[in-house]
Amino acid sequence: MAKRISLHEFQAGLARRLAGAQDNRASALLAVQAGKRNWLVDLTEAGEILAVPPLAPVPLAQSWFRGLASVRGNLFGVVDFAAFHDDLPIAPVGHARLLLVGVRHNQNCALLVTRALGLRSIEDFEPVPTHADADRPWIGEQVQDAYGNAWTRLKVADLLNHARFLDAAQS
């Protein structure tokens, strides 16, 4: 016969499990590569990641603004995240992916990245002392993994609100 528990015990247990699940999600990071740089995006900030659909070019736009992509009938502006950081442009084929970062902030924006590298935990990294870059406030904490690989935490909201990022028009 099944063990009977009170409603109060059930609710307390459920609350503990939900709190634990939220703590794990808050410490989880999505790892992506864009050009030569490895990035970590908080799962709470990361949106969907998907294969690169056909891109419609936009005339008179910056070279790092790759165009528009239709994702389930919604248009997303696509930024080549490597080219945005003065690296070589990413070919939108093979392992390349779109990271829909603006959805949470009510912006239809996607970052074109070289590849998705999976989920990581913040506990897998050690901080590296660096100084803040006033010109690029979206560049967060610098960390390294157990193999000595350098990683950069991406501050999505700071990126999406930066004047340089918002001005994709060719000068």
Image (spheres, helix red, strand yellow):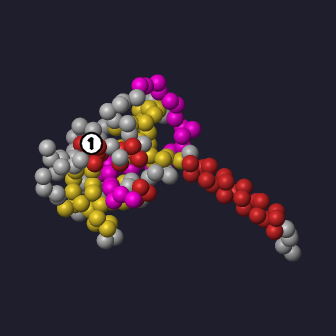
- Note whether 89 is above or below 74 in the view shown: above
Disc 1 residue type (three-letter):
Arg
- Note whether 22 is above or below 73 in the view shown: above
Q: What quarter of the picture does the C terminus occupy?
A: top left
Q: Quadrant of residue 47?
A: bottom left
Question: Where does the image place residue 156, in percent across and percent down from the top left?
Answer: 41, 46
At mark 1, the secondary structure is helix
Instruction: Identify the residue at horizontal 40%, vertical 29% (top origin).
Output: 132
Residue 145 forms part of the magenta stretch: no
**Residue 164 versus residue 151: which sits nearer the camera?**
164
Side of 17 relative to 6 (left or right): left
> Does the rendering let one see residue 38?
no
- For label 1, the residue is 164
Instruction: Identify the residue at horizontal 44%, vertical 52% (top origin).
Output: 46
Side of 75 relative to 58 (left or right): right
- Note whether 115 is above or below 57 in the view shown: above
Q: What quarter of the picture does the N terminus occupy?
A: bottom right
Q: Residues within 10 Å of mark 1 (few under 14, many from 20)?
A: few
Question: Where does the image place residue 21, in percent across and percent down from the top left?
Answer: 63, 54
Question: Where does the image place residue 2, in percent across and percent down from the top left?
Answer: 84, 73
**Residue 108 versus residue 3: which sits nearer the camera?**
108
Q: Which residues are magenta?
A: 106-131
Instruction: Identify the residue at horizontal 27%, vertical 57% (top origin).
Output: 77
Q: Quadrant of residue 148?
A: top left
**Residue 52 versus residue 10: which sits nearer the camera?**
10
